[in-house]
Amino acid sequence: MNALPTPEPTSGLLRPILVGGTGRSGSTIVGHLLDHHRDLVLARPMEVRFIAGNDGLADALSVAVRKPGSDEARAAAGLAIDRLQSRWFERAENVGLHQSMSRADVADWSREYLAAFGADPVTASRTLAHRIMDRIAARLDADRLVDTTPANARKADRLEAIYPESLVVVVTRDGRDVAASFVSQPFGPNDVFEALAQWEQRMLRTHKAVAGCRPGRVHTVDLLDLVVRDRPGALSALCQFLGVDVDPGMVEWFDASVTPAGMHPGRWRSDFDEATGARLDAEYDAACARLAESGVAIPA
């Protein structure tokens, strides 16, 4: 089976940094920024997906916790394995888990996961996730990994059972800019108002997930603070949360590669005609009011 040795409890492999957001909120920027720290390595693929993605290991474990031993739990575990092997193992020639492990290894580990899931879904989920992530770390010669699957934010509580010592970084951004960014991409909603509704839903889900985490496990980064308003302060706070120093390599890359203008703050004002912009502004105000009533902090 060629499994790697189980890491020691203090190993950095058991303390991954899970970066997430609503999508198009800046989690990729934060991932690359952390990748330029000498002690941190961005996973390849940078979004592993199989743990926090839709119908991944975290979702299957959630069903098993709610309905232990049920047909629904077994079906969720089977779906997670199907997506792992058919969708996330090899997403493109140079993007996927296949760069770090063989399909035969994943098949063996998956069979063990399914066999053990009914009796002990937590241990089964941890074992499979750790085996895969440890192989990625071995290929990259990494002591501590960073993953930027966007769903890490809205499933932060579910991920805690799989990686209890993990830290979560939630990246937030003005919902109008998120919506405008989505419709310019070949994936996600292509209607700006649908994209804004998705942003609101994901902000609320993230808020609830963070509330379910242990205190001190989650740090929120406002992209506007990080890139425009307080670059040194936001970067220092992020590093302090992660327990690392501000590496000069991070600062050098950040200054050269991420500019305030490149962030396109307020892009929604120029991407749409006046009538669409006015409607987007009004719907955003209404969404923010609803979120605030639920206790959600709104990006400035």
Image (cartoon, rainbow, N blue to C red):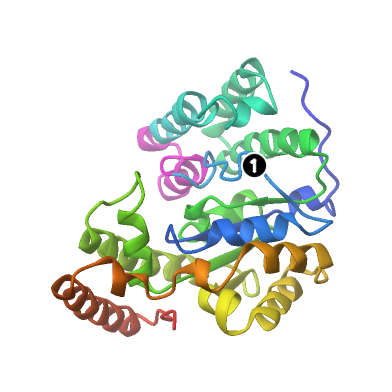
Q: Which quadrant holds the N terminus?
A: top right
Residue 226 visible in the current orientation:
yes
| Residue 114 percent across, percent down from the top left | 53, 27
At 46% from the left edge and 24% from the top edge, which residue is drawn? 86
The residue under the point 55% across, 74% down is 260
Residue pictured at 51% horizontal, 40% vertical: 57
Q: Is residue 61 above or below residue 244?
A: above
Q: Which is nearer the eye, 168 or 65? A: 168
Residue 78 inside the magenta-drawn segment:
no
Q: In this view, does 299 lie above or below 242?
A: below
Q: In which quarter of the image is residue 179?
A: bottom left
Q: In this view, does 27 lie to the left or right of 236?
A: left
**Residue hosting label 1:** 126
The C terminus lies in quadrant: bottom left
Q: Residue 162: image x %, image y %?
A: 62, 48
- 215 displayed left or right of 296: right
Residue 214 or 180: which is nearer the viewer? 180
**Residue 51 drawn at (x, y percent):** 54, 43
Q: What stretch is highlighted in magenta?
A: 54-73
- Magenta highlight: main SS: helix
Residue 64 lies in the magenta stretch: yes
Query: Dividing the picture into quarters, in which one does residue 228 lie?
Result: bottom right
SS under mark 1: helix
Q: Is residue 286 left or right of residue 203?
A: left
